[in-house]
């Protein structure tokens, strides 16, 4: 007679649940090819900015900057959206690191943009306070060229675009505006400076993947300028990169020298700043707004337009103030009622 061992249904269920748990744990540990953009709490700038003549802290209010945490998503987070942290967005690797580049390239680019944004922000803020600033916009500095874009092979990082179709380009906004005058698919003639020489190159356009109907040539640019400051301004964010804290830097410099910009509120700000004070859109506004909310921020200044719309959807009780330029940002803050 043959004896057959019978496994009870309860034991089978427990074994199945254990196997599912092991599989889920493995999927949690194994990284995917995607990344998560995560909120990071807004942080005060006062201790990170040093300006000769700055006034002592009065204990109320302050200017804050906001950042976005980027990390690899696990396979489980990639497949199950409910397991992602609050406010997280899943993005493919190529959205952060274009083909042909790596994270080292991206990091160096971000740090270079941070250095430039600090210099431009200091010039804008000090000029607003009446300092004599020697700063001449000198074109749109190419910091990255997208692979397979029309500009790929035609332009190189660290070259400066100084003209489009015979019209001068002094700022990145000039470049965007002049290219936008074309139909998608048309070519543009660019005047490009590299070292002491200039050349003319014809580059095609394609549709922007993020702005419907806008032609682009496939470059990322920042302000090129010769800036000489009358005082030494030191800003240290401990390795944080990118240009999006420019507006916050400029506001904090004015706050530290003028001491009533924040009106007693905790004020966060994001936006790339140009030499003429213009404020450009930035990425990660959803995460930055959540970070401001978690830090108990009262007021959050963001670039007008789509950035402001995204911020309002995630703001809860944080007051969102959209701005087009630095001067407008100061006016809107200074007309707020003094915080009780």
Image (tube, rainbow, N blue to C red):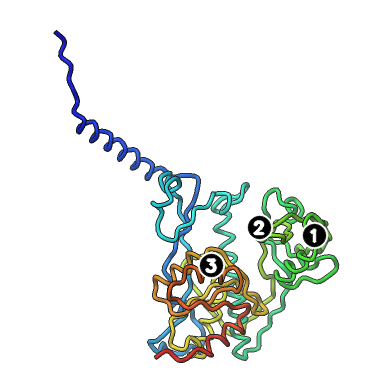
**CA–CA distance in space, label 1 to label 3:** 28 Å
Disc 2, SS = strand
Which residue is depicted at the point 66% across and 85% down? 133
Q: Is residue 289 above or below residue 75?
A: below
Residue shown at the point (35%, 41%) measured from the top left: 24
Q: Name the residue under label 2.
A: 144
* Residue under the image location 59 percent in, 83 percent down: 125
The answer to which of marks 1 and 2 sits earlier in the sequence is 2
- Helix, strand, or loop for circle 1? loop
Give the residue pinned by disc 3.
310
Check disc 3 and report its element: helix, strand or loop: helix
Instruction: Quadrant for residue 59, please give it.
Output: bottom left
Which one is closest to the eye, mark 1 or mark 2? Answer: 1
Q: Nearer the viewer, residue 48 or 29?
A: 29
Q: In which quarter of the image is the N terminus?
A: top left
User: Left or right: 98 with respect to 312?
Assistant: right
Of the numbered discs 3 and 2, the one sitting upstream in the chain is 2
The residue nearer to you, when weighing 195 against 179, is 179
Distance between the alpha carbons at the discs numbered 1 and 2:
23 Å
Q: How crowded is mark 2: few (under 14 residues within 10 Å), some or many (20 or more)?
A: many
Residue 43 position (above or below residue 31): below
Q: Is residue 275 left or right of residue 61?
A: right
Q: In which quarter of the image is residue 243?
A: bottom right
- Residue extending farthest to the right is 166
């Amino acid at each position: 007679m043959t004896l057959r061992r019978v496994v009870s249904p309860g034991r089978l269920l427990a074994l199945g649940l254990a196997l599912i748990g092991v599989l889920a744990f493995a999927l949690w540990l194994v990284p995917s090819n995607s990344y998560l953009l995560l909120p990071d709490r807004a942080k005060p700038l006062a201790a990170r900015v040093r300006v000769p003549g700055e006034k002592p802290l009065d204990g109320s209010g302050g200017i804050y900057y906001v950042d976005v945490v980027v990390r690899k998503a696990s396979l489980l987070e990639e497949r199950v959206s409910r397991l992602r942290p609050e406010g997280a967005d899943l993005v493919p690797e190529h959205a952060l690191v274009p083909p042909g580049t790596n994270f080292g390239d991206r990091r160096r680019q971000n740090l270079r943009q941070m250095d430039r944004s600090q210099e431009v922000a200091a010039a804008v803020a000090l000029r607003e306070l009446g300092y004599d600033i020697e700063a001449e916009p000198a074109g749109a500095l190419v910091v990255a060229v997208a692979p397979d874009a029309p500009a790929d092979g035609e332009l190189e990082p660290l070259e400066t675009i100084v003209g489009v179709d015979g019209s001068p380009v002094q700022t990145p906004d000039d470049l965007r505006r002049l290219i936008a005058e074309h139909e998608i698919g048309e070519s543009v003639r660019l005047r490009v400076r590299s070292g002491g020489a200039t050349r003319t190159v014809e580059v095609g356009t394609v549709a922007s993947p993020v702005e419907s109907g806008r032609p682009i040539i496939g470059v990322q640019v920042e302000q090129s300028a010769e800036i000489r400051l009358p005082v030494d301004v030191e800003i240290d964010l401990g390795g944080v990169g990118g240009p999006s804290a420019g507006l916050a830097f400029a506001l904090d410099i004015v706050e530290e020298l003028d001491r009533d910009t924040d009106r007693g509120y905790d004020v966060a700000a994001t936006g790339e700043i140009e030499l003429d004070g213009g404020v450009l859109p930035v990425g990660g506004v959803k995460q930055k707004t959540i970070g401001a909310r978690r830090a108990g921020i009262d007021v959050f200044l963001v670039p007008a337009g789509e950035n402001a719309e995204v911020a309002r959807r995630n703001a809860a009780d944080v007051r969102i103030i959209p701005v087009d330029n630095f001067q407008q940002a100061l006016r809107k803050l200074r007309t707020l009622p003094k915080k009780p």
